[in-house]
Amino acid sequence: MPKKNAFYAQSGGVTATINTTACGVIETARKHNNRIGKVYAGRDGIIGALTEDLIDTSKEPAAAIRALRHTPGGAFGSCRYKLKGLDEHRAQYERLIEVFKAHDIGYFFYNGGNDSADTSFKVSQIAERLGYPLVCVGVPKTVDNDLAVTDCCPGFGSVAKYVATSIREAGYDVASMARTSTRVFILEVMGRHAGWITAACGLAVEKEGDAPHILLFPEIKFDEERFLARVDDTVRRYGYCTIGVSEGLRNAEGKFLSESGLRDAFGHAQLGGVAPLIANLVQDRLKQKYHWAVADYLQRSARHIASKTDVLQSYAVGKAAVELALKGRSGVMPVIVRKSNKPYRWTVGVAELKDVANREKMMPRDYITTDGFHITGKCRQYLEPLVQGEDYPPYRNGLPAYVKLRNAAVPKKLGTVFKI
Amino acid sequence: MPKKNAFYAQSGGVTATINTTACGVIETARKHNNRIGKVYAGRDGIIGALTEDLIDTSKEPAAAIRALRHTPGGAFGSCRYKLKGLDEHRAQYERLIEVFKAHDIGYFFYNGGNDSADTSFKVSQIAERLGYPLVCVGVPKTVDNDLAVTDCCPGFGSVAKYVATSIREAGYDVASMARTSTRVFILEVMGRHAGWITAACGLAVEKEGDAPHILLFPEIKFDEERFLARVDDTVRRYGYCTIGVSEGLRNAEGKFLSESGLRDAFGHAQLGGVAPLIANLVQDRLKQKYHWAVADYLQRSARHIASKTDVLQSYAVGKAAVELALKGRSGVMPVIVRKSNKPYRWTVGVAELKDVANREKMMPRDYITTDGFHITGKCRQYLEPLVQGEDYPPYRNGLPAYVKLRNAAVPKKLGTVFKI
């Protein structure tokens, strides 16, 4: 295959280590400059490809690309924009090929979750149908840890480390205040459909009585009375109670609690925030003083406390994606394969995109205790390796020194404007 | 003075480094075991002294005390319990002296904020009146940074580092999502009366356009229209807007916004959380997609990202407190004295407790920009040294390894029970 340029784009919610993967892709591509020309990144994800708004990463010095390894967020911009079926949105897929052709792009790397795996797969199909030679490789990423086939998802280990650390730290705080002040503390974490992040909070427990005492999973319907009884019992037993709750907690009818009708003074619905609702309940029914925190984006951008395991895996899938592409493997995605738990050993394997596309990996029921309020030993065995090791960013003036790229635009070659 | 035991207690809201101070007190006392017998800690603060519930810190091995240096929360328990005037609550002060006498305590170290300085001062007065020889030394601590005389407060630098790091990281996240998703991000931070923590968010700005774009201080009354115009302008200019808001933000009438009438589905008042209110406003008026986070206890317990400067100062005031006591200085408090900004140099000085007691150090108006939405260069010059340096805790199984002490009780010597 003659030398071709590569296209790389970030998709969906960003993570603390998606740029680590970008670093892996670009550094590896640069090493193979006999076969890969320039790496063009989509500005704001796939939208950049559709609108021919490409970023020339070759304008970035090696040090800037290296710094991506420790920089959170999506350096080229990401987007929530799902390409639908090939028949439905054929024009979009054809446009992609048109842009790739104009810029001599022979490699397509799409860094995202389920949807992105699906898009990558469809792009590989349309390229084939149109007879355009394009090697399409999906690159996994999601804090939700819900991708199929891969043992875990790049980005998840760092959120897991953040939430477990944070709830442990808050637990130390609440334990000291419980005599005369706060007795119940609630931390709301991400993961609307799958409880992986909620489960990760549970890693903070080393001994009976350690925080968190209760976890509220999106998989387990919220039972107010059972929950209150457990809080009450925990406060009696240990003097305080620390709770990790998923933003996706649902009531008995399957409705998100966060959408269950909090209204502001003007009667407007208050969106989001299940932690304050749980807090209110504790206050009303148990008369306990509470505090609550909502970590929100802090958890998925907390590069300062990234898991080294996650950083290594995030880099590795980027590197592997380029190596797969150079072998001409299209319609695939590098995945993490667990070889052993103790000691933890992993390697990078290969999955077919069609096996990953549009599937969600839910928490197995036996990862949650029978009572529904905590994780099992089996879950801990799975999660524990993923938070191992620290990978601190450099600091400047007391704060993490993250990079902002120049993101120079590639001159447009097409006269056409594509409306998204 | 003959060899005497010492009493140490933690008071009020705990911090990421109050145990660092405890470590400084106990390690220094142990070095002077020719003059200081045992260090007894109050279980749950001053309540432990009143109820004769003392912890024998001599039962803790040196490694456990050493580990306090990197452990958040209050290792012996803290409390929100203010001793009032000497005449009003004379029985309580007399009880303290009774307990101290029973346990041969000659040194009183009280680690807290304004209230605690006041209590320490009163204890020194009552001891003198009752003719009981007691050296009383206050030890500063508060994340609010509002103590008088001292240049800064142990505990504050670490919160400052946490909030500045967090809002920078979230800023990288939002910047990448802004094209098709979240455009406005709001982080709520502590500091009900003084805007020091809100100001610290501002340290994340290095260049024009960096997050945070807007800060909402408790010192500046909230003007909805001016705020919305600024958000709108920021989104137009930079594509997104990141906001740091104090939990103590007040409206034009001086009322806390967080108490301004959010109600749940049952009509119960929703307490706390100014970030969701601001978010709702942005959504209703500007139709921008938002996310919000409330850091709450996470910020003041985040020992994993403590400021090294803060850790050194927190230890230093504990050490200095013991050294002052050994010189017979009573009614005083060690304070941080700034000697120069660049390079930052500091030393430990001495303040009279009566000059610290019950006073609040507010943010000078010239630390906030004229428009009220950010910090000035003068403020940055003050804050920047306080977040310098990292002081990582050790990790075990991927999480910070914090210590839980045995906290063995000292056998009671008094037959009397004191009700608090």
Image (cartoon, coloured by chain):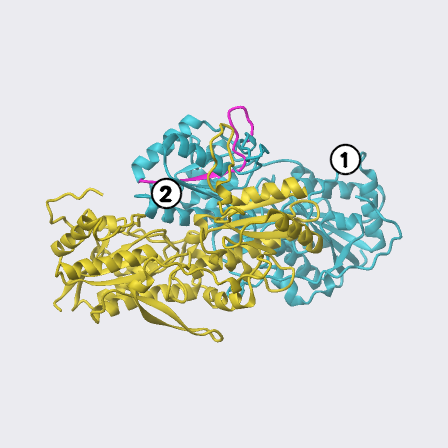
Chain colours: A cyan, B yellow
List the single residue furthest toward the top: A253
Q: In which quarter of the image is residue A67?
A: bottom right
Return the x and y of residue B339 as percentages of the image width and height.
42, 75
Return the x and y of residue B291 as percentages of the image width and height.
59, 44
Q: Give the range drawn in magenta.
A: A239-256
Return the x and y of residue B384 as percentages of the image width and height.
50, 66
Queried whether the magenta region covers residue B59, the answer comes back as no
Quadrant housing the C terminus of chain B? top left
* Predominant SS along the magenta part: loop
- Return the residue nearer the eye: A420 or A93: A420
- Return the residue nearer the eye: B10 or A145: B10
Q: Which chain's residue wears label 2?
A: A
Indicate which disc, 2 or 1, sits on the residue closer to the N terminus: 1
Queried whether the magenta region covers residue A240, the answer comes back as yes
Q: Nearer the viewer, mark 2 or mark 1?
A: 2
Could you say which disc has been placed on residue A182 in the image? 2
Q: Residue at x 83, y 51 (%)?
A: A99
- Return the residue nearer the eye: A386 or A75: A75
Can residue B273 be spotted in the picture? no
B27 over A210 or under it: above or below = below
Q: Which amino acid does label 1 sit on?
A: Gly
Q: What residue type is labelled 2?
A: Thr
Q: Name the residue under label 1.
A: A85
Distance (Cα) linking label 2 and label 1: 52 Å
